[in-house]
Image: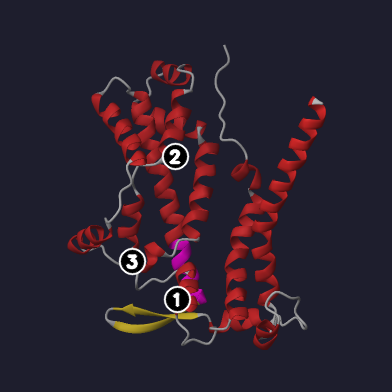
Amino acid sequence: MKKRNLSLLNVSLFLVLLIYTISLIWPLIWAIMTSVKEQYDFLYSPLGLPKEFIFKNFSTVLDKFEVNAIVDGIQVKQGIGDMLVNTLLYVVGGAFVATFVPCVTAYATAKFPQKKMSGIIYATVIVTMIIPIVGSYPAEITMLKNLGIYDTLLGVWIQKANFLGMYFLVFHAAFKGMAKEYSEAAEIDGANEFTIMTRIMLPLVKNTFFTIFLIKFVEFWNDYQVPLLYLPSRPTLSFGLYYVSNYTGNTISTVPLRMAGCIIILLPILALFVAFKEKLMGNITMGGVKG
């Protein structure tokens, strides 16, 4: 009787997970099918298979995908090449800063737990994770304008240079779990704190660092709100999709062309996931000195 109940539970869980998986995969399949349809084919059968595969939709998007950006008070059209450059600068720089700052801050707090500031920093991270901070956009924009770094990559990178969030705790746990033999051996050899951090401790968490960097890379690649608010003259690919999906006065306003644009922008992230799926889906682990 117990085995029968367990088997029924397994079947139920399998069906629930199967339905959930289909709900995640089906939108992607639908987007791919729609991206190779003519507009009339989509209107006639929005959920059916395409009558004819129109692969020229992708070349049309590559040629006509553009947005209007305001540069020095002048409206300028920026194409997919410009948006790709803006995206890489924003994503790579932002992901690195958003990973490096909590890493270094976590190292300092884990290295000197007896200092009052370490306790304050740790408590601040916990409190900000519990209490949501909303309504700060107007204040941030005003501050950036007063500092003269609004609508600049430097300003956005500085915004990302904070230690708040879950990944500070990940790095903190990694450094706390390290054996003291690493730093003690370096101190005996005369290494200072900066040398210990940069040449010994940080390389030991390189796998954790790279994994979090990849996660942040994907997060910022899909982000359109920050470029919309803080980089109006440097539209990214995600902002471009937001733009064409909300404004009909453009050459790729049809649903098939929009889906083709989504697929094109998805491909780099899909390639990144395939190349580093083990790091993205695996556990964040580290080694230590065995006694």
For numbered disc 1, what is the local secondary structure? Answer: helix
| Res. 192 image quadrant | top left
Q: Nearer the viewer, residue 63 or 206?
A: 63
- At label 1, which amino acid type do we have? Tyr
* Residue 234 place in picture, x, y as percent: 38, 71
Residue 127 on the magenta span: no
| Res. 286 image quadrant | top right
- At label 2, which amino acid type do we have? Tyr
Residue depicted at x 68% and y 59%: 25
Residue depicted at x 24% and y 24%: 116
* Residue 169 place in picture, x, y as percent: 42, 34
Pick the quarter of the image with the N terminus.
Answer: top right
Kindly report the distance in space between the C-alpha atoms of the residues bearing marks 2 and 3. Answer: 25 Å
Pick the quarter of the image with the C terminus.
Answer: top right
Using the image, determine if residue 222 lies above or below residue 207.
below
Q: Which residue is mark 3?
A: 229
- The range drawn in magenta is 80-89
Kindly report the distance in space between the C-alpha atoms of the residues bearing marks 3 and 1. Answer: 13 Å
Q: Which residue is mark 1?
A: 243
For numbered disc 2, what is the local secondary structure? Answer: helix
Using the image, determine if residue 54 lies above or below residue 206.
below
- What is the crowding at mark 1: few (fewer than 14 residues within 10 Å), some, or many (at least 20)? some
Q: Which residue is mark 2?
A: 167
- Residue mark closest to the camera, 2 vs 1: 1
